[in-house]
Amino acid sequence: MKAVELAKSYNPKDFEDRIYQGWKEKGEFGPKKNATGEHFSVVMPPPNVTGILHMGHALNNSLQDIIVRYYRMTGRPTLWVPGTDHAGIATQNVVERQLKKEGLRRQDLGREKFLERTWLVKEKHHDIIKSQLEKMGCSCDWEHERFTMDEGLSRAVREAFVTLYERGLIYKGKYLVNYCPKCGTALSDDEVEYENMPGKLYHVRYPYADGSGYITVATTRPETMFGDVAVAVHPEDERYKAIVGKLLCLPLTDKKIPIIADSFVDREFGTGMVKITPAHDPNDWECGRRNSLEAVNILNPDGTLNDNCPQKYRNIQAVEARELVVKDLEDGGYIVKIEDHAHDVGHCYRCHTVIEPYLSDQWFVRMKSLADKALDALKKSDIVFYPRRWENTYSHWMETIRDWCISRQLWWGHRIPVWYCKDCGEVIVSREDPTCCPKCHKSNLEQDSDVLDTWFSSWLWPFSTLGWPEETADLEKFFPTSTLVSAYDIIFFWISRMIMSSEEFLGKAPFRDIVITGLVRDIQGRKMSKSLGNGIDPLEVIDQFGADAMKFTLCYMAAQGQDVLIDMNSFKMGSRFANKIWNATRFLLMNLEGRNLVKVDEKDYSVMDKWIYGQLNSTCLAIQKAMEGYRFNDAAQSIYSFFWNDFCDWYIEESKQKLLHGSDEQKDRAISILMDVLESSMRLMHPFLSFITEEIYQKLPNHTGDVIVASYPVYDEKRCYDQAHGLVSSLQDVVRTIRSVRSNLQIAPEKKLKVVFRPSKDFIATDLISDEIVFVSSLVGASSFIIDKDAKEPVDGAFPANGLGYECFVFVRDAIDVDAEIARLKAEIAKAEKSLAGVEAKLSNEAFLKNAKAEAVEKEKSKKAEFLEKIKKNSEHIGLLSSF
RNA sequence: GGAGGAUUAGCUCAGCGGGAGAGCGCCUGCCUUACAAGCAGGAUGUCACAAGUUCAAUCCUUGUAUCCUCCA
């Protein structure tokens, strides 16, 4: 057999792209027709089509890829569905920003042209995302790729909307929604991000209508006072019980408003009296509804004050109006005081503009019944979270769920399938576009101008991607999906809603296992963001270290849903490991020259052979358990220590004796077992380091087919070899003990020493060490290694060391010049003592302690400790040497 | 205000009712022809604090402190 040459160093760029294209061309990613057993399917959380993939995506998709490759190799029919999300607001913002540079607004183009342009942007970004996923090595089935605005998925959206409408779960209503004046659209509660900001708390006098004095209310937003319809106090607040029901004059206006009692009022806050502005505050809205109060909207859609305000303030932006109102209140003597007051302000999660609570017509989904079904799914354990603690978060959210505002005043998205008859006012909700009014039969119809919330399409993702509402073969075979991998920041947005929709439309949970990963953060624990400039680009990681290094490193660090803190250097770990694999393989392939691979029978295994097979076997079990519990870091660590510490550091080292100096028969035998373990290792490691294992696998003389579809090594309880494990552990202990002696005495490796080894009579590894005496001697640098159960103690001129069940005597006298060594140590002690005296002088000087900087004092103290340590150790060594 | 998480080596983090671990970093010595992206050896920890349960606590319970996240 000829040796196989491998490039001198590991360079992932040489093969990663080629390997990926190879897999793709051979169709290795799709489910195998001849696969048997339970299906394993995963849907990829669809990235926003205008985003660029960041480290969070890299983590998420790396873990999915590992799972998918693992189950594919176990032989189950496996499908990983990729795709992208149209991301309504985000994408529309991207296009609007482009237009702005050209001095245009979307209205200048009109809906149709604007959408055409958006589709172009979508195509461009989609291609980038797809190539990023390919670079990462994701083994998703591109034949099954979907986009949330595909024809099929759009049909699913229609079906879902109309079905919910028919079931009475969708309604249109006036509601106080979160409104982004910049995006010009309503946002769901979850799309609002709260941020603590400095502000002012204004204490304002509201006079009694009968002129008998005034009360004081505290507010952070005085300009909303024109929408005030009442002032509320707590019903049990003794201070104010008597005044409930009295009328107040609203300053700057001629309006009269009542004092009411409502238990939501916080008695401790401000004066314990709050103005009620139902149209501009969520709490006030609820309060207004409870007390049948009118909601007076004072804002135009663009955020300026409207005609419900006094003439003077109309058409002015709210923030400017605030200053004007405060000035007028001050002039009128209504202001009691103004305090600094930090409070949480809601911001748009897309553009970060301050959101306004705004009263408008919107479409809603009634969530209660949907949430109940989704809660049942958890109670029945149809879904399981990893780690379990997220189940509390999920339940709590489901229990306190509010109706979901699904309409958005955007152009990019699924049009709401509702038409209004302009002639008779009929509302038509339809799966197909209607051509005429079913009531008056005229065709003067107009479709609702709003589109649906992006999540209204992504909540159908696990089944819409498989063909729903059609009853397709894919849906039959791969639904429900097996595992969902997602970060915790979209449990509410997405995961919970998928469960609700799936239960509602298909009567079962969309997946069983929900793996919640942590977020990827920078090394200081901050979120990676554009504004901080602390992001790491996955493509740059791949460029520097390779896709395998990235995936393996992330896997190694992804413990139990904990956040992952990384910087560029973190990926060296994976890179070094890949390099190790490369070089170990290179060495073994070199040694194929002139060899014949033979089948070694189990009965002919040496202790070392049994040991390495046992280690391989126990690694299989560890990985199986880790994968079942989604403990990715455990799996990565098992692989790492098996391949590096066991296989490379001990087994290959042991084999070198035979490979270099053995008979032809011994060489054949040694390389055969090495190749066998290597081949298994490639299969074992493939899910975690996909490219390098495939590249190597193809070069192995004992491979068949591609490793991506090879069978995964399984644990075999007949191949545990516990006895061999114990023996080799003892041998390793002996080697480490002797090495430690040499190292502590700083004996150069090339200096070979005589070693006498004295095992106790029940030391188990005596025979093994005897058999492996050449190997052991080379590891410990022994000129001769004598096993002598009766060696007398102390052996003259030997340095003793001991371990569990044995003693060793290392003959160091020949290796070191005792007198010279003692002289050197004495000189060092003298020097240290002199330095110590200086340090002590300083430390006993009051002036120094009092005036010197704290760091300086500390420095002196640590120097003192160092010198003392040095003196002590050197004295001990002199004692040892003197006894020779 | 409610909930959850974190606190272990210099850093980033695993772990776990019975002998404190990994990677990186650091120190020492080695270019031993697979790998210096390597090899060998080494140092570093009142496992946040306090009490309790236990034969035994870094681990379980309770409380405290500090930090983070989510929800209201």
Image (cartoon, coloured by chain):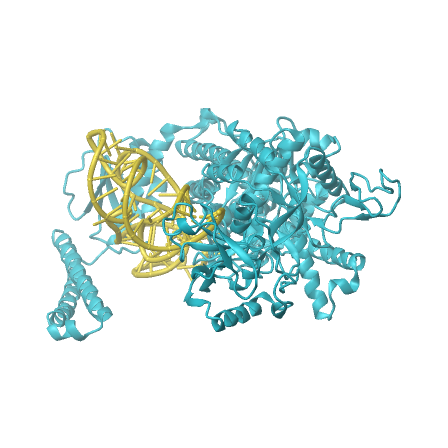
**How many discs mark residues in the rendered view?**
0
Query: Could you tell me residue A601's position as x and y percent?
Result: 50, 27
Vertical comparison of A409 with A472: above or below: below
- Taking depth in this image into account, of A51 and A174 the one nearest to the observer is A174
Vertical comparison of A203 with A407: above or below: below
Residue B2, located in which quarter of the rendered image?
Answer: top left
Query: Could you tell me residue A655's position as x and y percent?
Result: 44, 40
Left or right of A750 in this view: A832: left
Left or right of A759 in this view: A96: right
Vertical comparison of A76 with A534: above or below: above
Question: Which residue lies at the image location 62% right of the left edge and 69% below the top edge?
Answer: A316
Asked if residue A74 can be seen in this view, the reply is: yes
Residue A169, located in which quarter of the rendered image?
Answer: top right
Q: In which quarter of the image is the N terminus of chain A?
A: top right
Query: Could you tell me residue A832's position as x and y percent?
Result: 16, 66
- Taking depth in this image into account, of A102 and A129 the one nearest to the observer is A102
Q: Chain A is drawn in which colour?
A: cyan
Vertical comparison of A854 with A757: above or below: below
Question: Which residue lies at the image location 70% right of the left edge and 65% below the top edge?
Answer: A98
Which residue in the rendered view is the most extreme toward the right? A442
Asked if residue A6 can be seen in this view, the reply is: no
Query: Could you tell me residue A177's position as x and y percent?
Result: 60, 51
Q: Chain B is drawn in which colour?
A: yellow
Left or right of A119 in this view: A590: left
- Taking depth in this image into account, of A758 and A364 the one nearest to the observer is A364
- Taking depth in this image into account, of A708 and A623 the one nearest to the observer is A623
Residue A401, located in which quarter of the rendered image?
Answer: top right
